Structures are given as C-alpha cells and as structure tokens.
Amino acid sequence: MAEQTYNFIDLFSGCGGMSLGFERAGFSNLIAIDNWKDALVTYAYNRPGANTLCADLLTLKPSDVEDRIGGKNVDVIIGGPPCQGFSVAGKRIVDDERNQLYKSFVAMVEHFKPKAFVMENVPNILSIGGGIIRNAIFSDFEQLGYTINCKVLLASDYGVPQNRRRAVFVGLRDKQYTFPDKTVNNPVTSWDALSDLTEDTTIEGGAYSNAPLSDYQRLIREGSVGVFNHNITIHREQTKHIIAMVPDGGNYKNLPKELWQLRKVHIAWTRLNSKKPSFTIDCGHNHHFHYKYNRVPTVRESARLQSFPDKFIFVGGKGSQLRQVGNAVPPFMAEQIALNLKTYI
Ligand SMILES: C[S@@+](CC[C@H](N)C(=O)[O-])C[C@H]1O[C@@H](n2cnc3c(N)ncnc32)[C@H](O)[C@@H]1O
C-alpha cells in the first residue's frame, strides 16, 4: 500500500532549511512565504515548480494564502517567526509590531486548523520574563484546541555537525507530541564535514578534488554534480597574520593581549574545532574561522555545517547567501522532527 503523504505550509520560510527537512521525510510543500526575495529565489531554484510567495506576514491574510493553494486542506504548518519577535516589560508581553509576526502564525493555525504545527525559535524564548512568553504561546494554541509540547533541541544530536540549539514547539489536535530521541552517539565533527573541500575557491560546479573522507561527506554529496558556493573570502594580510596565531579550536585568548581589543566582540577570532561539531554559525560576520585555513568558512562550508546537501545551491550575493544559510533550521534536525511527527498524524 502506498504510504500516506502529508502537505505543509512554511511561514517565514527563508531559503527553506526547515522545509527541506520535511521534504526529506516525505512531506510536500504547498506554499513557502517570506518577505525576503533572495531567500525565496533560492527556495524555488532548488525546487522547480515550488509555490513561493513574497509577502509581508504582518498583513497577509490567511484567506489570501488559501486562494494561493487552491483551497486545499493543510496537514501541517511549520515556521519560525523572527527571533526578535517578542519583547517583555516586567511581567508583561509588549504588544508591539514585532510580536504581531508571531500572532500571524497563530492566525494561520486558527484558519487552516492543521493536524499539527511546528514552530521554532531561539532557546531563550522559554526563559525570558520567567517563562511568560512560553506560557502565552501555550495558552494561545491551547485555546485553538491544540496540545503543545516544547523542547530545546541540540542539532548535533541529530547528525548535524553543529551545536546549534533551537526551541521547538509542536502542537497536535488530540495527543501529546514527544520529541525524537537523539539519532547519533558520536557527533559529526567539523573535520567530518569539511575536510574534503579545498582551501581555495572552486569554480561553480567544479569537480570535487578528492573522494569523500567521512560518512558525512558521502551522505552530504548524494546527488551532487559538483562543488557550488565555494568561493573563499580574501582577507587583509593583517587579518590572515592574526588568525594564523590561533590554533585549531582556539580563540582570541590565544592571541597576545594587545590584540584582544582589536575586535569588539569576544566571539571574534574564533576557530572551529576540527574534532568537535561547529559552534552556532553566524550569518556572515567574519568572526569565525576555518579550523585550518586562515579564512572564514565559505557558503558551502557553512551549508555543510548546517546539513544542507551539496546539491542544494544558494543564489544571490555572497552576504545574502551566508544569511540564508545562517538563518536556517538545520535540515537534518527538521527531518527527524518531521519523521517523528508522521507517527502522530
Ligand atoms: C529564522 S528565518 C527562517 C528560516 C527558515 N525557517 C529556514 O529554515 O530556512 C526568519 C525569516 O523570517 C522572515 N521574515 C521576517 N519578517 C517577515 C515578515 N514581516 N513577513 C514575512 N517574512 C518575514 C525573514 O526574511 C527570514 O527569512
């Protein structure tokens, strides 16, 4: 018997990291909505025929979305309203415009009444204001008839070479969701993820310079016809000279003290540790460097650390590509949530 397939809507989709996890688990996307054109171009480039909508979710009405998907029933709504979407004054949630982005997610759930929803956000959403945001989220969705569970998940528990933490809320109509157990005992390291990529730029679609050196590389290369988005950043000589003093896994503390103040933030001059998963990658601030090379990771290397397969190609300027990658939910982590969710719906 053919396996039942489920559809989903992705709100605040970005380039579609979370979508990709759901697709890998066999879900199909009805529409991806974001107000960032570049990210949607990447979304569509990797999914010919995808239904994307560039729109402001502050003002977009659920009925407009319903029209765009031809009135179909929606099984699951996924998405991550932007992290800065909540502000708190004392014990009160400030009802400002940013908070409305989250409200638009609630309004879509209220309208479409999906079997389930999955909403992700920054971990401290659970603790700010002594948990009032968390409680407000639970109460908003409980009023719509959902049973909610939430947990901070660590991406490296699911085969992502990165210690990224995200708070995930899952709501179901009639049952309590339990989050997936970790799928790996030995985390994938930065070396596992990156060691087959070259120090220098590879021309778009150029051949791999060697065979995969780890199981992760074998997996991440599946279906790829070459190396894309591996265009290195050329740093100033002084930057190269300074980062050369920081060893694999080191940071500014490995530098002479007089250099500590050179960059204002403490995360500056940090190198990946080849023997560990990466720290949370940023959106292209040039503070985190390769574990071996005297340069920041390329878009492809960042994508590998986020578990985007090599066949997923990023479009737009390099800064935009790095932001698309850095904003995403790691696809391998989303895939485990989605696979597990299937057993409930
Ligand atoms: C954390 S990112 C989402 C990443 C995405 N879930 C993924 O896995 O790739 C948040 C997204 O919200 C989008 N966004 C912010 N404000 C918005 C608005 N008013 N309307 C629509 N999208 C918005 C941003 O452009 C960004 O792509």
Image (cartoon, helix red, strand yellow):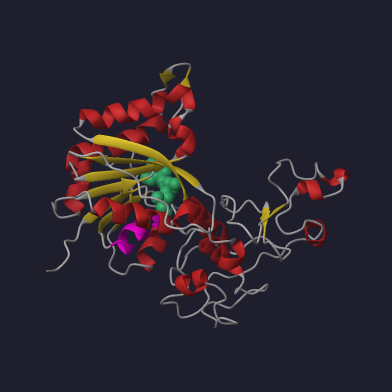
Q: Nearer the viewer, residue 7 or 1?
A: 1
The residue shown at (35%, 64%) is 44
Looking at the image, is 203 positioned above or below residue 246? below
Do we see residue 36 in this rendering? no
Q: Nearer the viewer, residue 253 or 46?
A: 253
Magenta segment's dominant SS is helix
Q: Is residue 24 one of those drawn in magenta?
A: yes
- Quadrant of res 237: bottom right
Q: Is residue 162 above or below residue 226?
A: above
* Magenta stretch holds residue 345: no
The magenta segment:
15-25
Quadrant including the N terminus: bottom left
Residue 249 is situated, as x and y percent measured from the top left of the image, at 70, 55
Q: Can residue 198 be seen from the camera position used here?
A: yes
As drawn, is 215 to the left or to the right of 3? right
Could you tell me residue 159's position as x and y percent? 47, 59
Q: What's the residue at 59%, 55% (across, down)? A: 278
